Image: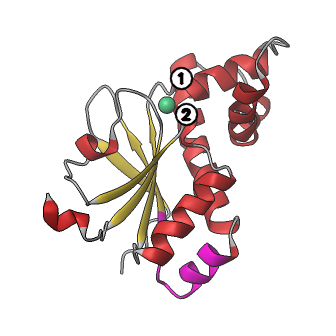
Amino acid sequence: MPELAAGQQPFAIILGCSDSRVPAEIVFDQGLGDLFVIRVAGNIVAPSQVGSVEFAATRYGTRLVVVLGHSQCGAVLATLEELRRPAESQSRNLRSIVDRIRPSVEPLLVSKGPQDEDTLVREAVRANVRGAVAQLRQGSEILQQLISQESLLVVGAEYSLETGAVEFFEGLPAED
Ligand SMILES: [Zn+2]
């Protein structure tokens, strides 16, 4: 694709999970040069992810950011496990991922009484996406400025491993 070597104009930035079953380009049926993809276990927002979004938004003028979570996310499951049975042996590096998911997921265990496991996992995945959307919106002056100028939209979505469908559920502009 020699024409792509000269530059890129991705129309969306995807912050997705590293899970082998959720490759963003295939999920959204996009080709080379279409998506600026950041993948990290649990689609967490750490400084390097914020920096990557800033980079694409300012350098390529990309105006849409999608935080793409997915059903049965292993990183979210690991966080639920850790909250119930803290393991001291966990590596510091792995802990840094769990620690970024924990604040979104922990309230689900505290505030609600007994609930079935499937519901809990589903809500935890969505809470983690909402948390990541909020962190991207608030965690960077550059992104805040772009958002306030309506030059950037940050939305959350979930990919279903079971159906192959993507549902957008967070941060969509109000219909009018
Ligand atoms: Zn995952």
Residue bearing the label numbered 2: 41
Q: Amino acid at mark 1?
A: Gly
Point 69% across, 17% down: residue? 81
Q: Indicate which disc residue 74 carries.
A: 1
Measured from the top left, where is residue 38 in percent x and y? 47, 49
Q: Is mark 1 within 8 Å of ligand 1?
A: yes
Residue 112 in view, yes or no: no
Q: Residues within 10 Å of mark 2 (few under 14, many from 20)?
A: some
Q: Quadrant of the C terminus?
A: bottom left
Amino acid identity at mark 2: Ala
Q: Earlier in the sequence, mark 1 or mark 2?
A: 2
Which x, y percent locates residue 68? 44, 46
The answer to whether 127 appears left or right of 84 in the picture is left
Q: Residue 147 location, x and y as percent? A: 55, 79
Can residue 72 be seen here? The reply is yes
**Mark 1 vs 2: CB contact within 8 A:** yes
Magenta range is 142-154
- Asked if 135 appears above or below 72 in the picture, the reply is below
Task: Measure the alpha-carbon separation of dots 1 and 2.
Answer: 8 Å
Circle 1 SS class: helix
- Residue at 30 percent across and 71 percent down: it is 9
Where disc 2 sits, the SS reads helix
Estimate the x, y position of residue 26 in percent, counting from the top left: 24, 41
Is residue 78 shown in magenta?
no
Q: Residue furthest right?
A: 88
Could you say which disc has been placed on residue 125 in the image? none
